[in-house]
Amino acid sequence: MRKYIAAVALLLGVVFIISRMTEVKSIADTLKGGDLRYVFLALGVQALWLVNIALQYWTIYRELDIDVKFSRLIQISVAADFVNIVTPSAGVGGMAVFISEAQRDGHSTGRVTVAGVLFVLFDYLGFFCILAIGLGVLLRRNNLTSTELIATGVLIVITSVMAFLTYQGMRSEQALANALSWIISHVNRLLKPIIHRDYLSEEHAIEFAHEAADGLRELRQKPRNLISPFVVALIGKLLLVLILWLVFLAFQVPYSPGTIIGAWSIGYLFLIVSPTPAGLGVVEGALALALTSLNVPLGAAAVITLAYRGITYWMPLLVGIIAFRWLSHGNQPQLPVAGSSNEPQSGSDQTGMGEK
């Protein structure tokens, strides 16, 4: 079944790329028209961003006492990002990659799920630091609209719910179970007239609370260690801002720090609240509109948007295909050779990147 799912995901990736070959060619032609020194620098920063994502997971895994090599987390996180891009699953597909690897390696799936929630929470908190500056720039230039405020409000609600559940889990298992049961009961009550059944299971929520609280209890004993994941998340956002700045330099478009931070903040905000995978189609429009509202000429805004998304969207997608294929290949079970005394080791990884 795992091999079948992996094959379907890879097929979706190939079909996705083929269906957008015109866009890929347009991006390639656009990047060729810029100063290649800055283009390659931006690609290098994007590679650092991929490593930074794995580092953020690694700091969280370490605090939850999940033993995974950093090199293997790079592979898993890049593969998960690929799955999130090609499957409209609101991030669930990528999380399934982490859970699948946890099951294979004998780690607690509850703890790994908690790690995923904490990753998103710190990611949002790090983004808020830059978003506050970006909104301040838009407000000062009289460009802040109700659309940005509503999107920010949605993000605040999502982050608040995640922070509340994390806090409840750090308090006790029962507190987390009660909070999840309350949320699930209201979601089921809201959706039952439409789907005529319970959408979420309270029993599964209680089981999850049991596993999750075990990991969160350790965080309660050493809350200062939560600073590291937050700092790494903030660095990740600064790397993306740096890429946008390098794109401005590559195409010799006049800029100010406020223009770069304000436009990037809006683009990333709509990447988060967008209903499409990785904000496809939504981020492009939001970023171009933000740039033009900050006095970047329309033609230059279109070029910058196309180049920036080509680097930050398409590069992770292409690298993710390789990582996902490598990961699925490395998950093949090792069969003992007849007459050999060497038995396959539990949790081994044929790629040589996953020894525990």
Image: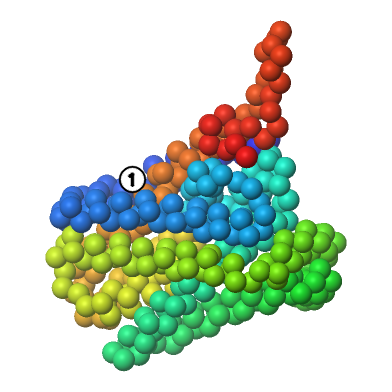
Query: Residue 180, position in %: x, y?
Result: 77, 71
In depth, the one of 288 and 168 nearer the eye is 168
Give the residue at mark 1: 21
Residue 67 visible in the snapshot: yes
Residue 96 visible in the snapshot: no
In depth, the one of 34 and 113 nearer the eye is 113
Query: Residue 189, position in %: x, y?
Result: 79, 74
Amino acid type shown at disc 1? Met
- The residue depicted at 49 percent of the width and 62 percent of the height is 276
Query: Residue 342, position in %: x, y?
Result: 69, 18
- Category of crowding for the residue at label 1, using alpha-carbon neighbours closer than 10 angstroms: few (below 14), some (14–19), many (at least 20): few
- The residue depicted at 63 percent of the width and 60 percent of the height is 63
Outermost top residue: 339
Residue 217 versus residue 351 in the image, above or below: below
- Secondary structure at badge 1 equals helix
Residue 13 versus residue 36 in the image, above or below: above
Is residue 199 left or right of 282 when viewed as pictured?
Answer: right
Residue 216 versus residue 55 in the image, above or below: below
- The residue depicted at 44 percent of the width and 56 percent of the height is 52
In depth, the one of 353 and 332 nearer the eye is 353
Residue 285, image quadrant: bottom left
Is residue 283 left or right of 198 when viewed as pictured?
Answer: left
Residue 90, image quadrant: bottom right
Is residue 44 left or right of 248 when viewed as pictured?
Answer: right
Q: Quadrant of the N terminus?
A: top right
- The residue depicted at 66 percent of the width and 69 percent of the height is 222
Q: Quadrant of the C terminus?
A: top right
Residue 48 versus residue 123 in the image, above or below: above
